[in-house]
Amino acid sequence: MTLNVVGHGVAYREKVSEFPWIDNPAKTFLASSFAVPPFPKRPTLGYRNISISASSMSGAKQLAMPENTIEQVELLTSVNDAHGGVIVNIEQPMDSGVFAPLLKASISEWRNQEKKGVWLKLPIEHANLIESAVKEGFRYHHAEPNYLMLVYWIPETADTLPANASHRVGIGAFVMNSTREVLVVQEKNGRFKGTGVWKFPTGVVDEGEDICAAAIREVKEETGIETEFVEVLAFRQSHKSYFSKSDLFFVCMLQPRSFDIQKQNLEIEAAQWMSVEDYIAQPFVQKQELFSSVAKICLAKSNKDYVGFSPYCSTTSSGKRSFLYFNNQDLKHIGASDKQQ
Protein backbone atom coordinates (compact mmCIF):
# COMPACT_ATOMS: atom_id res chain seq x y z
CA MET A 1 0.00 0.00 0.00
CA THR A 2 1.20 3.56 -0.73
CA LEU A 3 0.34 6.52 1.49
CA ASN A 4 -0.32 9.60 -0.62
CA VAL A 5 0.72 12.72 1.26
CA VAL A 6 -1.41 15.74 0.41
CA GLY A 7 -0.24 19.09 1.80
CA HIS A 8 0.21 18.57 5.55
CA GLY A 9 -2.03 15.51 5.78
CA VAL A 10 -1.83 11.81 4.97
CA ALA A 11 -4.64 10.33 2.89
CA TYR A 12 -4.99 6.57 3.05
CA ARG A 13 -7.48 3.90 2.03
CA GLU A 14 -8.09 0.83 4.19
CA LYS A 15 -9.59 -2.57 3.38
CA VAL A 16 -12.62 -2.67 5.66
CA SER A 17 -14.98 -5.12 3.95
CA GLU A 18 -14.70 -7.53 6.88
CA PHE A 19 -16.27 -4.91 9.17
CA PRO A 20 -19.89 -4.54 7.97
CA TRP A 21 -20.71 -1.97 10.64
CA ILE A 22 -18.45 0.67 8.98
CA ASP A 23 -20.65 3.38 7.56
CA ASN A 24 -18.75 3.82 4.28
CA PRO A 25 -16.15 1.15 3.44
CA ALA A 26 -15.11 2.95 0.27
CA LYS A 27 -14.39 6.22 2.05
CA THR A 28 -10.88 7.66 2.00
CA PHE A 29 -9.89 8.79 5.47
CA LEU A 30 -7.63 11.80 6.14
CA ALA A 31 -5.07 11.29 8.87
CA SER A 32 -4.03 14.01 11.28
CA SER A 33 -1.78 16.73 9.91
CA PHE A 34 1.71 16.71 11.27
CA ALA A 35 4.50 19.23 11.52
CA VAL A 36 7.93 18.49 10.08
CA PRO A 37 10.84 19.39 12.39
CA PRO A 38 13.03 22.18 11.00
CA PHE A 39 16.09 19.99 10.49
CA PRO A 40 18.13 21.30 7.51
CA LYS A 41 18.52 17.86 5.91
CA ARG A 42 14.78 16.99 6.14
CA PRO A 43 12.68 18.59 3.38
CA THR A 44 9.39 20.23 4.25
CA LEU A 45 6.26 18.95 2.58
CA GLY A 46 4.70 22.21 1.56
CA TYR A 47 1.77 21.46 -0.70
CA ARG A 48 3.51 19.00 -3.01
CA ASN A 49 2.03 15.57 -3.60
CA ILE A 50 4.57 12.86 -2.80
CA SER A 51 4.39 9.15 -2.03
CA ILE A 52 5.73 7.33 1.04
CA SER A 53 5.98 3.54 1.21
CA ALA A 54 3.74 2.11 3.90
CA SER A 55 6.56 -0.24 4.96
CA SER A 56 8.66 2.76 6.00
CA MET A 57 5.81 3.83 8.32
CA SER A 58 5.59 0.43 10.07
CA GLY A 59 1.82 0.49 9.77
CA ALA A 60 1.57 3.73 11.79
CA LYS A 61 0.59 7.33 11.12
CA GLN A 62 1.74 10.61 12.60
CA LEU A 63 -0.04 12.45 15.41
CA ALA A 64 -0.85 16.14 14.87
CA MET A 65 1.73 18.31 16.71
CA PRO A 66 2.01 22.07 17.23
CA GLU A 67 4.13 23.83 14.66
CA ASN A 68 6.62 25.03 17.27
CA THR A 69 7.61 21.53 18.43
CA ILE A 70 9.88 18.94 16.92
CA GLU A 71 8.42 15.92 18.78
CA GLN A 72 6.61 13.37 16.71
CA VAL A 73 4.43 10.50 17.98
CA GLU A 74 3.47 7.56 15.83
CA LEU A 75 -0.01 6.06 16.08
CA LEU A 76 -1.45 2.84 14.79
CA THR A 77 -3.35 3.26 11.53
CA SER A 78 -7.07 3.05 12.19
CA VAL A 79 -10.42 3.70 10.56
CA ASN A 80 -13.60 4.99 12.18
CA ASP A 81 -16.56 2.67 12.58
CA ALA A 82 -20.21 3.74 12.46
CA HIS A 83 -20.63 3.80 16.24
CA GLY A 84 -17.98 6.21 17.47
CA GLY A 85 -15.17 3.69 17.68
CA VAL A 86 -12.10 2.75 15.68
CA ILE A 87 -10.88 -0.37 13.92
CA VAL A 88 -7.23 -1.39 13.75
CA ASN A 89 -6.19 -4.06 11.30
CA ILE A 90 -2.57 -5.11 11.72
CA GLU A 91 -1.33 -6.19 8.30
CA GLN A 92 2.46 -5.74 8.45
CA PRO A 93 4.86 -7.66 10.72
CA MET A 94 5.71 -5.71 13.89
CA ASP A 95 7.87 -6.38 16.91
CA SER A 96 5.95 -6.42 20.18
CA GLY A 97 8.44 -3.95 21.63
CA VAL A 98 7.47 -1.49 18.90
CA PHE A 99 3.76 -2.32 19.02
CA ALA A 100 3.26 -1.77 22.78
CA PRO A 101 4.15 1.96 22.89
CA LEU A 102 2.30 2.56 19.62
CA LEU A 103 -0.83 1.01 21.10
CA LYS A 104 -0.51 2.97 24.36
CA ALA A 105 -0.09 6.28 22.49
CA SER A 106 -2.98 5.44 20.17
CA ILE A 107 -5.34 4.71 23.05
CA SER A 108 -4.40 8.04 24.61
CA GLU A 109 -5.16 9.89 21.37
CA TRP A 110 -8.44 8.00 20.83
CA ARG A 111 -9.45 8.93 24.39
CA ASN A 112 -8.73 12.60 23.61
CA GLN A 113 -10.90 12.23 20.51
CA GLU A 114 -13.67 10.76 22.70
CA LYS A 115 -13.69 7.51 20.80
CA LYS A 116 -15.55 4.60 22.34
CA GLY A 117 -14.72 1.04 21.33
CA VAL A 118 -11.51 -0.21 19.74
CA TRP A 119 -11.56 -3.29 17.51
CA LEU A 120 -8.09 -4.80 17.09
CA LYS A 121 -7.78 -7.48 14.45
CA LEU A 122 -4.64 -9.61 14.72
CA PRO A 123 -4.03 -12.14 11.93
CA ILE A 124 -2.61 -15.41 13.19
CA GLU A 125 0.85 -14.52 11.87
CA HIS A 126 0.90 -11.56 14.29
CA ALA A 127 0.11 -13.59 17.41
CA ASN A 128 3.25 -12.14 19.00
CA LEU A 129 1.28 -8.93 19.66
CA ILE A 130 -1.49 -10.53 21.73
CA GLU A 131 0.27 -10.23 25.10
CA SER A 132 0.98 -6.53 24.59
CA ALA A 133 -2.67 -5.86 23.73
CA VAL A 134 -3.96 -7.79 26.76
CA LYS A 135 -1.62 -5.88 29.07
CA GLU A 136 -3.16 -2.65 27.80
CA GLY A 137 -6.62 -3.89 28.78
CA PHE A 138 -7.85 -5.54 25.59
CA ARG A 139 -10.00 -8.66 25.86
CA TYR A 140 -10.81 -11.43 23.42
CA HIS A 141 -13.99 -10.95 21.39
CA HIS A 142 -13.93 -13.80 18.88
CA ALA A 143 -11.56 -15.89 16.82
CA GLU A 144 -11.62 -17.34 13.34
CA PRO A 145 -9.15 -19.80 11.78
CA ASN A 146 -6.92 -16.98 10.52
CA TYR A 147 -7.32 -14.13 13.03
CA LEU A 148 -8.14 -13.06 16.58
CA MET A 149 -10.35 -10.05 17.32
CA LEU A 150 -9.71 -8.15 20.54
CA VAL A 151 -11.70 -5.20 21.88
CA TYR A 152 -11.17 -2.33 24.29
CA TRP A 153 -13.77 0.06 25.73
CA ILE A 154 -12.30 3.53 26.30
CA PRO A 155 -14.87 5.69 28.17
CA GLU A 156 -15.70 5.14 31.83
CA THR A 157 -19.24 4.15 30.98
CA ALA A 158 -21.04 0.85 30.47
CA ASP A 159 -19.40 -1.23 27.73
CA THR A 160 -21.87 -1.42 24.83
CA LEU A 161 -19.72 -3.31 22.34
CA PRO A 162 -21.84 -6.05 20.72
CA ALA A 163 -21.15 -9.54 22.00
CA ASN A 164 -19.83 -12.34 19.87
CA ALA A 165 -22.30 -14.64 18.06
CA SER A 166 -24.42 -16.30 20.73
CA HIS A 167 -26.17 -19.15 18.88
CA ARG A 168 -25.32 -22.19 16.87
CA VAL A 169 -27.89 -23.32 14.27
CA GLY A 170 -28.66 -26.95 13.45
CA ILE A 171 -31.22 -28.89 11.41
CA GLY A 172 -33.01 -32.21 11.61
CA ALA A 173 -34.43 -33.65 8.37
CA PHE A 174 -37.79 -35.41 8.21
CA VAL A 175 -37.82 -37.23 4.85
CA MET A 176 -40.77 -39.49 4.03
CA ASN A 177 -41.35 -41.50 0.86
CA SER A 178 -44.67 -42.43 -0.78
CA THR A 179 -45.01 -45.62 1.31
CA ARG A 180 -44.83 -43.65 4.60
CA GLU A 181 -41.29 -44.68 5.36
CA VAL A 182 -38.94 -42.16 6.93
CA LEU A 183 -35.22 -41.83 6.28
CA VAL A 184 -33.25 -42.65 9.46
CA VAL A 185 -29.63 -43.17 10.47
CA GLN A 186 -27.53 -44.59 13.28
CA GLU A 187 -24.44 -42.58 14.16
CA LYS A 188 -20.91 -43.83 14.78
CA ASN A 189 -20.04 -41.00 17.18
CA GLY A 190 -21.66 -38.76 19.77
CA ARG A 191 -24.33 -39.48 22.37
CA PHE A 192 -26.18 -42.01 20.17
CA LYS A 193 -23.14 -44.16 19.41
CA GLY A 194 -23.88 -47.81 20.16
CA THR A 195 -27.41 -47.14 21.46
CA GLY A 196 -29.24 -48.66 18.50
CA VAL A 197 -31.39 -45.54 18.22
CA TRP A 198 -32.60 -44.63 14.74
CA LYS A 199 -32.82 -40.88 14.25
CA PHE A 200 -33.37 -38.29 11.55
CA PRO A 201 -30.30 -37.00 9.68
CA THR A 202 -29.02 -33.92 11.51
CA GLY A 203 -26.25 -31.39 11.14
CA VAL A 204 -24.99 -27.85 11.65
CA VAL A 205 -25.76 -24.97 9.31
CA ASP A 206 -22.54 -23.59 7.84
CA GLU A 207 -21.65 -19.92 7.91
CA GLY A 208 -23.47 -18.11 5.09
CA GLU A 209 -25.70 -21.13 4.41
CA ASP A 210 -29.50 -20.99 4.33
CA ILE A 211 -31.45 -23.39 6.57
CA CYS A 212 -33.18 -24.96 3.58
CA ALA A 213 -29.87 -25.51 1.79
CA ALA A 214 -28.26 -26.97 4.90
CA ALA A 215 -31.06 -29.53 5.30
CA ILE A 216 -30.66 -30.70 1.69
CA ARG A 217 -26.87 -30.89 2.07
CA GLU A 218 -26.91 -32.85 5.32
CA VAL A 219 -29.31 -35.48 3.97
CA LYS A 220 -27.16 -35.87 0.86
CA GLU A 221 -23.93 -36.13 2.87
CA GLU A 222 -25.20 -38.70 5.37
CA THR A 223 -27.40 -40.89 3.16
CA GLY A 224 -26.76 -40.02 -0.49
CA ILE A 225 -30.47 -39.20 -0.94
CA GLU A 226 -31.38 -36.23 -3.15
CA THR A 227 -34.19 -34.14 -1.68
CA GLU A 228 -36.29 -31.04 -2.20
CA PHE A 229 -36.97 -28.73 0.73
CA VAL A 230 -40.64 -28.42 1.73
CA GLU A 231 -40.90 -26.45 4.97
CA VAL A 232 -39.79 -25.90 8.55
CA LEU A 233 -42.09 -27.89 10.84
CA ALA A 234 -40.84 -26.59 14.19
CA PHE A 235 -37.75 -25.25 15.93
CA ARG A 236 -36.23 -25.63 19.37
CA GLN A 237 -34.02 -23.26 21.37
CA SER A 238 -31.71 -24.44 24.15
CA HIS A 239 -28.92 -22.83 26.15
CA LYS A 240 -25.49 -23.67 27.54
CA SER A 241 -24.89 -26.06 24.68
CA TYR A 242 -21.71 -26.23 22.60
CA PHE A 243 -18.97 -24.05 24.14
CA SER A 244 -21.67 -22.58 26.44
CA LYS A 245 -23.48 -21.07 23.45
CA SER A 246 -27.22 -21.22 22.86
CA ASP A 247 -28.55 -23.54 20.17
CA LEU A 248 -31.33 -23.24 17.59
CA PHE A 249 -32.49 -26.49 16.01
CA PHE A 250 -34.89 -26.50 13.04
CA VAL A 251 -36.96 -29.58 12.20
CA CYS A 252 -37.33 -29.54 8.41
CA MET A 253 -39.49 -31.58 6.06
CA LEU A 254 -37.98 -32.62 2.73
CA GLN A 255 -39.34 -34.55 -0.24
CA PRO A 256 -37.09 -37.36 -1.53
CA ARG A 257 -36.00 -37.19 -5.17
CA SER A 258 -33.98 -40.42 -5.04
CA PHE A 259 -34.33 -43.54 -2.91
CA ASP A 260 -31.13 -45.61 -3.16
CA ILE A 261 -29.25 -45.05 0.12
CA GLN A 262 -25.49 -44.61 0.00
CA LYS A 263 -24.47 -43.90 3.58
CA GLN A 264 -21.50 -41.87 4.64
CA ASN A 265 -18.95 -44.23 6.16
CA LEU A 266 -17.12 -41.70 8.32
CA GLU A 267 -19.98 -40.68 10.62
CA ILE A 268 -22.90 -43.01 9.83
CA GLU A 269 -23.07 -46.59 11.14
CA ALA A 270 -26.26 -47.47 9.24
CA ALA A 271 -29.06 -45.85 7.24
CA GLN A 272 -32.43 -47.15 6.10
CA TRP A 273 -36.04 -46.40 5.24
CA MET A 274 -38.21 -47.21 8.28
CA SER A 275 -41.98 -47.10 8.66
CA VAL A 276 -43.04 -43.97 10.50
CA GLU A 277 -44.93 -46.10 13.02
CA ASP A 278 -41.80 -48.13 13.84
CA TYR A 279 -39.79 -44.95 14.23
CA ILE A 280 -42.28 -43.48 16.70
CA ALA A 281 -42.50 -46.80 18.59
CA GLN A 282 -38.79 -46.75 19.53
CA PRO A 283 -38.45 -46.73 23.37
CA PHE A 284 -36.08 -43.77 23.23
CA VAL A 285 -38.52 -41.69 21.18
CA GLN A 286 -41.36 -42.63 23.49
CA LYS A 287 -39.47 -41.71 26.67
CA GLN A 288 -37.87 -38.48 25.51
CA GLU A 289 -40.45 -35.69 25.52
CA LEU A 290 -38.74 -33.58 22.88
CA PHE A 291 -38.28 -36.49 20.45
CA SER A 292 -41.83 -37.63 21.06
CA SER A 293 -43.22 -34.15 20.36
CA VAL A 294 -41.23 -33.85 17.13
CA ALA A 295 -42.43 -37.29 16.03
CA LYS A 296 -46.05 -36.32 16.64
CA ILE A 297 -45.63 -33.12 14.62
CA CYS A 298 -44.10 -35.08 11.73
CA LEU A 299 -46.88 -37.65 11.90
CA ALA A 300 -49.51 -34.89 11.87
CA LYS A 301 -47.81 -33.36 8.83
CA SER A 302 -47.80 -36.71 7.03
CA ASN A 303 -51.56 -36.95 7.71
CA LYS A 304 -52.02 -33.41 6.36
CA ASP A 305 -53.22 -32.19 9.74
CA TYR A 306 -50.40 -29.68 10.22
CA VAL A 307 -48.97 -26.75 8.27
CA GLY A 308 -45.40 -25.64 8.80
CA PHE A 309 -43.35 -22.70 7.57
CA SER A 310 -42.30 -22.56 3.94
CA PRO A 311 -39.38 -20.48 2.65
CA TYR A 312 -40.22 -17.26 0.86
CA CYS A 313 -37.23 -15.79 -0.98
CA SER A 314 -36.93 -12.05 -0.50
CA THR A 315 -34.23 -9.39 -0.16
CA THR A 316 -32.99 -7.30 2.74
CA SER A 317 -32.80 -3.50 2.75
CA SER A 318 -29.18 -3.82 1.60
CA GLY A 319 -30.14 -5.98 -1.37
CA LYS A 320 -29.00 -9.35 0.01
CA ARG A 321 -31.03 -12.47 -0.65
CA SER A 322 -32.93 -13.65 2.41
CA PHE A 323 -35.49 -16.34 3.22
CA LEU A 324 -38.60 -15.57 5.24
CA TYR A 325 -40.25 -18.69 6.70
CA PHE A 326 -43.97 -18.57 7.47
CA ASN A 327 -47.25 -20.42 7.16
CA ASN A 328 -47.71 -22.01 3.75
CA GLN A 329 -51.26 -20.75 3.38
CA ASP A 330 -50.15 -17.17 3.98
CA LEU A 331 -47.27 -17.72 1.57
CA LYS A 332 -49.73 -18.30 -1.28
CA HIS A 333 -51.56 -15.12 -0.34
CA ILE A 334 -48.32 -13.09 -0.21
CA GLY A 335 -47.17 -14.52 -3.53
CA ALA A 336 -50.46 -13.54 -5.15
CA SER A 337 -50.18 -10.03 -3.69
CA ASP A 338 -46.69 -9.64 -5.10
CA LYS A 339 -47.85 -10.59 -8.59
CA GLN A 340 -50.68 -8.06 -8.41
CA GLN A 341 -48.22 -5.33 -7.47
Image: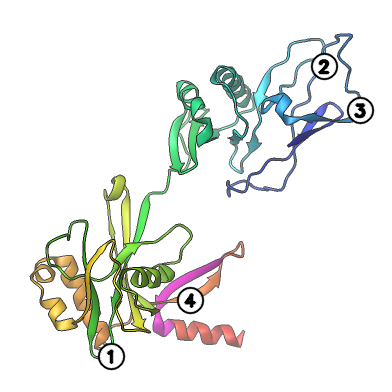
Label number found at residue 133: none
Judge whether 96 appears above or below 318 on screen: above
Q: Report how far apart the C-alphas of labels 1 and 4 lie in the structure.
A: 26 Å
Closer to us: 81 or 159: 81
Q: Nearer the viewer, mark 3 or mark 1?
A: 1
Closer to us: 325 or 76: 76
- Please name the residue shown 55% across and 19% down the image: 100
Q: Report how far apart the C-alphas of labels 1 and 2 lie in the structure.
A: 81 Å
Name the kind of residue labelled 4 in the image: Tyr
Question: The magenta stretch spans which residues?
Answer: 321-330
Q: Quadrant of residue 104?
A: top right
Closer to us: 172 or 323: 172
The residue wearing badge 3 is 47
Name the kind of residue labelled 1 in the image: Ser
Q: Which of marks 2 and 1 precedes in the sequence?
A: 2
By what rule are the colours in the image chosen? Answer: rainbow
Q: Quadrant of residue 260?
A: bottom left
Q: Which of marks 4 and 1 precedes in the sequence?
A: 1
The residue wearing badge 1 is 178
Judge whether 87 appears above or below 207 on screen: above
The residue wearing badge 4 is 312
Q: Position of residue 198 (x, y in %)?
A: 17, 71
